[in-house]
Amino acid sequence: MTALAPVIVIGCPKGGIGRTTLAVNLAAMLALAGKSTLLVDLDAKGDASASFGIERAEEGKSAERFGEPWSMIKDSLGAPSPPGLSVWAGGPALTELSAELERLEGGCEGLLHAGLVEARKNYSAIVIDSPSNLGPLACNALGAGDVLLIPISEGPHLESALRDTIQRALECREDYTIFGVRFGAPCTEEPEECPLGLDLLETALCGEPEVFQEAAKRGLPIFEHDPSSRAARCFVELGREVLRRVVNPPPKLTGAGAQSA
């Protein structure tokens, strides 16, 4: 039986903490590692899509297509670079989609989970850039996910935002795998205690805002914009860690194998 692609949600209802930067560059690194990857941009700003030179969606987003597996695949576009990356574009059209989901009675939060059924068979990994709120699109993202990565950076109200996100994720599934990703810390800095006792990934992401801004303007991930930068090297390490711990985790031994281990 073919393994289903893990769905990795990048989320936290707090803006300006590096959520889209993390989603864009993680998706790029997975694709560069040879894993066919789908990036689902659920932000009405569409910045993740634009980072790969994909036009922001102005129309064509409906609840019906959102929850229909083959429509999700057909509506996804191949990114100019890197090879192996596709993007389900975000943009202004998601404002109306969010409003439509708000109007639906019950069950709408499971639409994306259903919509990704075929994508999970056709891709090796799926990365979702969740919006900076806990509205219907973000709740759909959490409902579809297997792993939640939360950018951790300094700033007010972080712990409250973390608590709300984690609580909502665990309401979707009790066995959610949740990691914090340190953002803006030196790459060599030892992990500190994370708010709420959240498990941290080992890799920290360097803060080089000018590099991120220039890469976004060119419609390129960090590694292709400036492969010699500290930020690029950090994302290479992050990609390797996510491959090891999420996309290609070691098999869990059961039965006699577990007893002899």
Image (cartoon, helix red, strand yellow):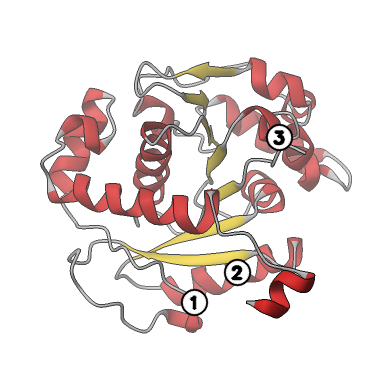
10 Å crowding of disc 3: few (<14), some (14-19), many (20+) = many
Q: Give me the C-alpha separation between circle 2 and circle 1.
A: 9 Å
Residue type of the residue flagged with mark 1: Leu
Q: Find residue 158 and report its image quarter.
A: bottom left
Local secondary structure at mark 1 = loop
Q: Describe residue 178's horizontal placement relative to residue 116 as left or right.
A: left
Q: Find residue 105 and report its image quarter.
A: top right
Residue type of the residue flagged with mark 2: Ile
Sequence-wise, the earlier of marks 3 and 1 is: 3
Q: Describe residue 56's horizontal placement relative to residue 51 as left or right.
A: right
| Tag 2 near tag 1, CB within 8 Å | yes
Identify the residue position indicated by label 3 in the image. 116
Q: Quadrant of the N terminus?
A: top right
Q: Find residue 15 and report its image quarter.
A: bottom left
Identify the residue position indicated by label 1 in the image. 198
User: Can you say whether 59 is above or below 251 in the image?
Assistant: above
Residue type of the residue flagged with mark 3: Leu
Local secondary structure at mark 3 = loop
Identify the residue position indicated by label 2 in the image. 166
Q: Nearer the viewer, mark 3 or mark 2?
A: 3
Counting from the top left corner in percent of width and height, residue 191 is at 30, 77
Q: Give me the C-alpha separation between circle 3 and circle 2.
A: 22 Å
Which residue is pictured at 44% across the width and 67% down the height?
180
